[in-house]
Image (cartoon, rainbow, N blue to C red):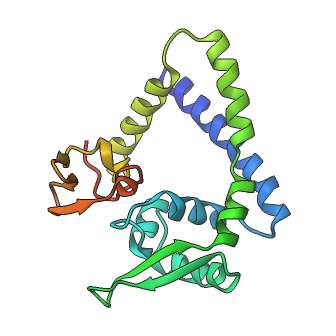
């Protein structure tokens, strides 16, 4: 059974990556460039650093640094020094990066697959895949990088949202994005 799950997940990933490669080629990008742009578009202000990106992708900081230089030269991202701590660099998508990212995302593939699942499936496929993802992350001893609002440290206060781990206020936007400190 476990090998069936592995084979299925492996095939799904191959299909998704194949679609991404086709779309990346149209824009002169490599799949890793897309993965970086996608992460930057979905991470919150605690996770928009080169170190968090390297951790998320399982790459060395040097490789990430060189790729970020290329994305910066192509005007797809911006590096911004943190206002409080000058040692921290935040990564942001530029409008051109957002535009390319929207064109590369395999939303058509997912929309079509979702329609097929909804027609034929009674069980919640989202729950199944989320549980499988969490199990894989735990087995790999990797950070979960989940949505901030699903973290055990996420709290709602009278004035908004708060991170119980960092004791910092969170914006609604932060709560909807990926965080490297996410804990289930």
Q: Residue furthest right?
A: 26
Q: Extreme front residue here?
A: 159
Q: Quadrant of residue 152?
A: top left
Look at 37% across and 35% down and name the residue there.
135
Residue 167 x %, y %: 14, 62
Please tell me which residue is depicted at 65% across the width and 26% down the height of the picture. 114
Specify the quadrant that holds the C terminus.
Answer: top left
Asked if residue 28 lies left or right of residue 4, the reply is right
- Is 20 drawn above or below residue 51 in the view shown? above
Q: Is residue 182 left or right of residue 101?
A: left
Q: Is residue 11 left or right of residue 87?
A: right
Q: Residue at x 43, y 37 (%)?
A: 133
Above-or-below relation of 179 to 147? below
Is the residue 81 above or below the residue 22 in the image?
Answer: below
Residue 15: percent from the left, percent from the top?
Answer: 72, 40
When asked about the image quadrant of residue 164, the answer is: bottom left
**Residue 173 at x, y percent in the picture:** 40, 55
Residue nearer the viewer, 21 or 90: 90
Q: Tell me: 77 left or right of 89.
A: right
In the image, residue 85 sits, relative to residue 49, either above or below, namely below
């Amino acid at each position: 059974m476990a090998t069936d799950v592995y084979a299925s997940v492996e095939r799904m990933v191959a299909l998704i990556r194949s679609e991404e490669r086709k779309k990346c080629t149209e824009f002169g990008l490599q799949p890793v460039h897309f993965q970086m742009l996608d992460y930057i578009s979905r991470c919150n202000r605690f996770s928009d650093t080169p170190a968090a990106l390297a951790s998320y992708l399982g790459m060395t900081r040097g490789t990430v640094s060189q790729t970020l230089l290329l994305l910066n030269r192509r005007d797809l991202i911006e590096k911004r020094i943190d206002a409080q701590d000058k040692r921290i660099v935040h990564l942001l998508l530029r409008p051109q990066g957002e535009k390319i990212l929207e064109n590369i995302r395999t939303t058509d593939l997912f929309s079509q697959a979702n329609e097929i699942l909804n027609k034929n499936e009674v069980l919640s496929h989202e729950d199944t895949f989320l549980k499988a993802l969490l199990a894989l992350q735990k087995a790999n001893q990797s950070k979960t990088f989940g949505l901030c609002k699903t973290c055990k440290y996420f709290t709602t206060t009278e004035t908004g949202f708060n991170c119980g781990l960092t004791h910092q206020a969170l914006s609604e936007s932060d709560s909807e994005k990926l965080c490297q400190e996410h804990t289930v």
